[in-house]
Structure formats: C-alpha cells, structure tokens
Amino acid sequence: MSVEKLIFDLSKSVVEELYGVDIADGQIQINKTRKDFDGDLTLVVFPLLKISKKGPEQTAEEIGEKIVNSNDSIVERFNVVKGFLNFSVKSSIWLKELNKWLNEEEFGQTKTSSGKTIMVEYSSPNTNKPLHLGHLRNNFLGYSVSEILKANGHHVIKTQIINDRGIHICKSMLAWQLSGKEETPESSGIKGDHLIGKYYVAFDKSYKEEVAALIESGMDKETAEKSTKILVQAQEMLQKWEAGDEEVRALWKKMNGWVYEGFAVTYKNMGVDFDSLYYESDTYLIGKEVVEEGLSKGAFYKKEDGSVWCDLSSEKMDDKLLLRGDGTSVYMTQDIGTALLRYKDNPSLSALIYTVGNEQNHHFKVLFAILIKLGYEWAKECYHLSYGMVELPKGMGRMKSREGTVVDADDLMSSLTNDAKEATLERSQIEDLSTEEQNELFRTIGMGGLKYFLLKVDPKKKMIFNPAESIELNGNTGPFIQYTFARTQSILRSVKGFKKEVDSEVELFPIEQELIIAIGDFSATIKEAGENYSPALIANYVYELAKTYNSFYQSISIFKEEDENKKQVRIALSYQVGEVIKSGMKLLGINVPDRM
RNA sequence: GGGCCAGUAGCUCAGCUGGAUAGAGCACCUCCCUUCUAAGGAGGCGGUCAAAGGUUCGAAUCCUUUCUGGCUCACCA
C-alpha cells in the first residue's frame, strides 16, 4: 500500500470517528504538500466543513490532533494553514517503502497482464519522399506510447500503413522516367528515399513551369492547373498501375524498393521498429469490396453519376464520398479496408490507436462513424492519437516537401549527433573509451536530446522547433537527464558491496525524503501516461526527479558521511533514482549512458 | 460561414478530475569546483494566466460571450 493510500484511509476513518458519519471517498482529498510548507501530504479540509460544522482551522486542528495522537508511528507531526492540514510522515515509513522498491523488478510498471492487445499505428509515410521532422514527432510518439502501454500491462502490436500507391508515387516515377538518366541509389550514391524525393520535387518544378506557361498563354489558373501535360501523364500512369500494367508495376516495385531501403536505415537510426506492416496497395481493394457490400446492405447510397456516398447526417456531418464516379477509391476507402484487415488478422484486438496529425481529426471522426454504420462494434475502441504540428519559427514558413522546405529527418539526426560530439569532446574525459564507444555515446546524446525535445511537449499541442538553435544541453533537456543518470552510475562505481537494504531508522534530510517521495510517484505517472497516451507526463516526471536528485547531490556529501547507515541510504537513493531514470527514459525510447 | 483545437514570463513549455503566494528551462544579473561528473547547484530579475461577465468558501482550471491564431468541412493523400 502506498503512503498516500495509508494517509487517505487514516484520514477517512478519523473523520468518520470524530464526527460520527460515514463519508464518501470523494470527500477526502489528499494532495502533495506544496514545497513552501512543512509536511509531505496534505488533507484539504474545506469539503469536510459541512460535516464538522466548524471553521476550517479548527476542523483541521481536530483531525490533525487525533491522527498524531493515535498514529504517531505513521504521522510524526502536523501543521495547519488555513483549510490545509499538512502531515509530516515519519521517515521510517518512507525508508521502508524505499526498501521495497529497491528489490522490485521493473519498479513502477504493471507486472500482471491486462489481457488486452492494443495495436498502435504510427509513421505511415508516403513512399515518394524521405521522412522529415513531422515524421520524427509521429514516430517517437507512437513508439513511446507503445512502450508506455506495455508498461501498463498491455500487449502491443506496433504497425504502420505504408501509402505505397497513388498519384504521388506516380509523379516521382514519371519524373524519373522523363529525366532519362536511369539514376539508381547505387549509381548516384543517393539514399533511396532521398532519390525518389528528388524526383518528386523535380515533378513539381516542371508542373509549376508548365502551369505558368499556360497562364502566360491566356489560360485561367484553374484550368491550367488541371491541363498540364505532365499531370495528365501521371494520371495515365496511375490508371495503368490500377490496371496492372506490367511495365508500370515493375518500375513501381523497383522505386518503392529503393525507398524501403532508405527508410530502413532511417528507422534504425531513430530506434523505432514495427511488428507488422500494412500496404495500401493491398488494402485499398478490400476497402472497395467493403464499400460495395455496404452499398448492397443499404448502408451507403449511389448518386446518378455512379459515385458512392455515406450519409452521415445522423452524426451531424456532411456526406462522405467513398467511391468516385469512375469506380476508383479515395483515401477513406483504403482506410476502411485497412481497419478491417487489421481486425481480421487480430480478432482479439482491444483497441486500435492511430498516431496521426491533428489535421486529420475530421477524417478519423468520419472513418469511425462509417465503421459503426457498417456495424463494426470494435470501431468504438478505435482511437485517433492526434498530435499537433511541428512548426518552424516565425518567418521560416511552413514545411512543404514539394517545395523542399522541410527539415529532413536524416540530416537532422546526423547534425545533432555531430553537435553532441562537439559538446562532449569539449567537456568530458572519455579518451579511454574506444572510438566505437565514443561514437555510440555521441549518438545516444544527440538522439536523446532530439527525442526528449519532441516528446516533452503535450502531444495534443503544436510545437515550435528551431533547427538553427539545435538542441540545448542545459536545463529541461535529454542530455541533462542523461547526465544525472551518469552521475548516479559514477557513484555506484565507487561503491563496493552495495546492499539493496537500508536501515529504516536513520534520520533523513528534507531533500532526501523529498527524493524518496518523488521516486514513489513513478508508478502513478506510468499509469497516468498510459491513460492519456502522453509521453510528456513521463518526460516531465523524469526531469523533476533528476532536478531533485541534483539538488540532493550538490547539497549532501555521500562518501564523506561517517555514519555508515546514512551513507547506505544515500547510495541506495542514487541507485534507485538511476533505475527510475533509466526505465523512464526507456519509455521515451531514449538510452542513457553510464558515463558522459 | 459551420465544426474542432489552442492563447500562461521576452522565448520554449508545465500546471491532474476547481484548492495555499501561478511554476520550470532558455535569455539576463550574482554567487559556488583543496567533495563523489560544474552538461551541475544556490539566489535575483521577469505575469492583468487573451478580454469581459457568470458559477462558489475558493477559478489559469468549469459555463457564456468576444478577440486572436491554427486545422478542417475536396470525385487530394
């Protein structure tokens, strides 16, 4: 039982005894005591005034008095400030908790299985361009949420939908053909996904030139945008693809292959992975079938031109197109197919989480509504993990792949690793590490900084990333936390014969007690992060813990302490803080170095 | 125009289902390495929580209105 629960139960029974009434759990409100006041936990007495029929101070005094008198082995002393009753819990209680934690495997995590299998989709790139900054937030978020759900006892399947077909890839294919250069990753030395991206940009350039020329010759803008030769050619290519034209399919396979090779390298550097993959080229046909089926069941309707629609007026939304007049599918069609296939592959799925930017909020609302309409009850367990865009600072404009104004994922990762290298060589003494170990360290720090930066902000909110300022090393950053971990390990290296057992009767400094309390919050934080799909909660928690540890570290000497029992407590605290930082950071997908 | 989301220090962000004097980091200014990692610590400066009403013992938090910004409402993906 946690200390908080202990105090909760104690308060409740004392209040009931004191005023002779049964009270609901909701009326007992236990908070952590604010730092400016003496105490560890606080009972808010305002809700109890109706029962006590006395003023706040007097009520608090009465309760405090009775608790301390009858339970002085738990609560040492109390004080009252207005309607707040602050308890100071005996240090021995906290130290006993610490002893429990020291010997707990996977401290803070849920060890018993929930029996639930949750599928988490993230990344889901188009295959016509390399990954960029926005994908980084998406991937780190999806990966981290997966880890957090596992820590809450769920079984997780990480997946993605690869948008491998459509007009976008045809544009790259066409531009590549038209260039006549037969460039390959090998011949050009360009990473596969970047090579395809290059031709996507090339397409857009030609397209814009052609549009401009048409407008110049007197055509209006709208017509010009639809009638360029190059766009028509791309559309023809798409039709050939759908018809299964061998030549187009072969080119498509070849160029997608290059992209996958490139992605594999990027994912490896990012430290993310997937348990299963879905390809749009496989699922869009299933979607079409389902729509036809829905049409025959009367869930959808057909317009005169042959297009198929879903009536969503009952959901107060506009009708949604599902098949074009010519029978071809739209984005929504494919998503319906993908969802169905996933549940078919995993009938025991308890939830399906889509990690997709908030620009698609409406899309997912519609998708889930349509699935319900088709009679799939499981759609109620589908959840759109919607996150805010990553924006560049004012004046730098928006990121647009077509215009080449994106922050490329590969470039960013390598430049941050390089920054980490410079910073590390400047301050650390790591000459005795091998070159390999050093490079690994630079990577750990650079990636740690990047991941922490992108994950510490509430996923729902948009965030601003300034690539020019790069990643900070001081303050609320990944490297700060990594550094704190390295400190704890440095302590442990100097200790021989560390025992995971401390004397529970030693006296504690306030900062030590604060540290124990902070460690104890880990479990609740994991739970909350799981319920809210929010790595940010973990990030903020680990940061607070690291700060508290650093304050402790700086103000109290460990090895100069003559009292062996006190020294053991401080070493144990260092150990346990290290453990929590390590596993907390792991939930964020961030590694921590023993030295830096 | 309809819908959704956001607005907290110069900048980037925390503030849980309403609770004490609104917190961090960066930047700026002081101090602290004859102690275990100074990528650190201690302190200072900095706020009309977008605005106005309302709900109540109590509001950054809940409700209403207004202002500002973003996204979205495609036979695009």
Image: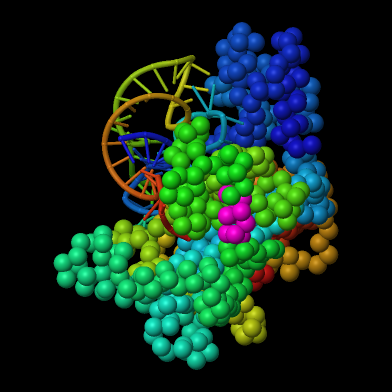
Most extreme residue toward the bottom is: A187
Which residue appears at 67% of the width and 59% of the height?
A158
| A91 in relation to A416, above or below | above
Q: Is residue A587 left or right of residue A110?
A: left
Most extreme residue toward the front is: A304
Which residue appears at 61% of the width and 8% of the height?
A53
**Residue A111 visible here:** yes
In the picture, residue A442 is in which quadrant? bottom right
| A552 in relation to A196, above or below | above
Does residue A432 belong to the magenta stretch?
Answer: no
Residue A101 lies, in percent from the top left, at 78, 49
Q: Nearer the viewer, residue A593 or A380?
A: A380
In the rendered structure, which segment of residues is drawn in magenta?
Answer: A283-291
Image quarter where the C terminus of chain A lies is: bottom right
**Residue A525 visible here:** no
In the picture, residue A574 is in which quadrant? bottom right
Does residue A289 belong to the magenta stretch?
Answer: yes
